[in-house]
Each structure stands twice: as structure tokens, then as C-alpha cells.
Amino acid sequence: MDLDHVRELPAPGDVGLWLVRTDAGTGDGAGILDAEELRRAASFAFDRHRLRYVNAHLALRGILARHVGRAPAALRFVRERCPGCGAPHGRPALADAPPDVHFSLSHSGDLALVALAATPVGADVEELTPAATADELTSVLHPRERAELAALSDPAERGLAMSRAWVRKEAYLKGIGTGLSRATDLDYVGTLPDAPGAPDGWSVRDVPVPQGYAAAVAYKVPSSVPSDVPSDVSSSVPSDVPSDVSSSVPSRVSN
């Protein structure tokens, strides 16, 4: 499989990170992607979005196939159980894979980010939040993060800070397997550059990506692997999260 449009990034610890240019690949995924991936690809209204989805998932399969020693088309994906409600819509996983294979995929615009680790991991990449909408989204932040944002007088800086906080949160919530069903104001990850916070037992790191994007990775530190996700994991989104948050925060499709 051609992975010329995939670049490995410097990564913390035992985490592997790859940046994918999703406009650069070619092919429709036939013969490699499974029926569900092909169905989702066909559901996109625009060819560009379909191509980006296919290329992101082909890259994921290529990276995982090299890691586990299988053919990309032979990989079968399943969903772990959600720690909040127990339903099978938690972290994506490889069927019949060793227990130390964890991965995460995120894509936004013409970029995708793949993370691979021996412990639970989450990755997120987003196009930057417009400065004009940053102030509208503060209710999704932890109180300390709101204070950090309020201290910034420059609207452009607030937009960057909001983007940093959002990708850090998404990466962490994907890592624990709840996604946005867990209230986004519960966990402090910070908004300041080069100073991400991290809930106990986890490490959250910013990922360098091209201008116009923000990205982060969150992974469970090895010494904390036996511990569970936060005890206050909830299966409901808090009432103060704006109903249009998915359209206000730059959208992406994640595995």
C-alpha cells in the first residue's frame, strides 16, 4: 500500500504518531476497506470529502498492518464497550489483536492524525477555531480554562487557546473511550501553549501540525494502566454545552 502521503512525527514515550495528507492519496478503497467503511465513504455528498475519508482510513490500515504483521484488508475493527453506559460504542479496536495495540484516528480538513500506543490513546486534529466564535464556546471549558481564556485580551489569541483546549479535551475523551458523552468541563487540560494539563494517570501533549490546525494526543501512562477511567464518567452531555457545538467547533470525522 502506498503511504507516501503519510509522515511519521516525533512522539512522546512509546506512542507513534503519523500525519496524513488526505488530499494526496488516490484510490477508492475497494478491496481494502470493509463494508462499513465503504458505506460511510459513499455517504459523503462531495467527492473531496469522500476522498479524504478513504485516504485517512487507508493510511490507518497501512500503519496498523505494518505494526501487527497482517495485510491491510485483513484487519477487522470492533468497538470496545463504553465505560459510561456499557454499550459497544467505545474506543475502536482491532479484533483478535494483542492487548497492547491501541490506536486513534482523527481527521479534519486535508489532514488526518493517527496515534498508536501500547496503552489506551486518543488523538485529535482540528482546523483552528475562528476567533469570533471562541467566546461563544467557553461554556464547554473547565472553570480554570475559562479563566485562562478570559485573561487573554487578543481575540486571535483566544481563538488559538480555544483550539488548543478543544483538541486536548477530544484526545483525552477519545482515549478514555467516552468521547463527548462525558461533560467537557469536568477535566482540566489547559489552554496555554506548551503547557497542557492532564487528568491523573494520563499524559496530554500538543502535536506540531501545519499552520491553520491544532492537534493533541493523550495516552495512559504505563504505571496507571490497571486503573479505570474517571469515576464520574457520565453517559450524558452537560446541559451547558451549546447545542451547535459540533458546527461551531471545526468538524472532523474520527474513527
Image: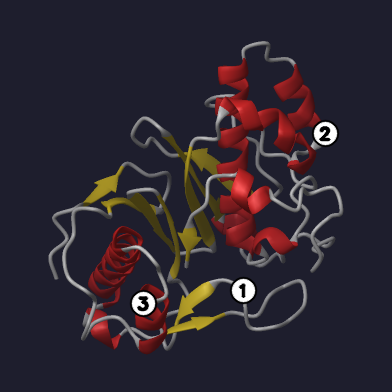
Callout 2 crowding tier (Cα within 10 Å): few <14, some 14–19, many ≥20: some
Callout 1 crowding tier (Cα within 10 Å): few <14, some 14–19, many ≥20: many
- The residue that disc 2 covers is 143
Q: Amino acid at mark 3?
A: Ala
Q: Residue at x 30, y 68 (%)?
A: 54
Determine whether the residue tagged by mark 3 lies in a helix, strand or loop: helix
Point out the tag, 1 or 3, that comes first from the N-terminus.
3
Determine whether the residue tagged by mark 2 lies in a helix, strand or loop: helix
What whole-number distance in Å separates the C-alpha atoms at marks 1 and 3? Answer: 24 Å
Point out the tag, 2 or 1, that comes first from the N-terminus.
1
Determine whether the residue tagged by mark 1 lies in a helix, strand or loop: loop
Q: Residue at x 55, y 80 (%)?
A: 79
Q: Amino acid at mark 2?
A: Pro
Point out the tag, 2 or 3, that comes first from the N-terminus.
3
Which of these two is toward me, 23 or 66? 23
Q: In the drawing, does residue 64 fall left or right of residue 247?
A: left
173 w.r.t. 79: above or below: above
What is the residue that sits farthest to the top in this orientation?
153
- The residue that disc 1 covers is 90
From where the camera sits, is residue 191 visible? Answer: no
Q: How many marks on residues?
A: 3
Which of these two is toward me, 234 or 240? 240
Which of these two is toward me, 171 or 35? 35
Give the number of the mark in front: 1 or 3.
3
- The residue that disc 3 covers is 42
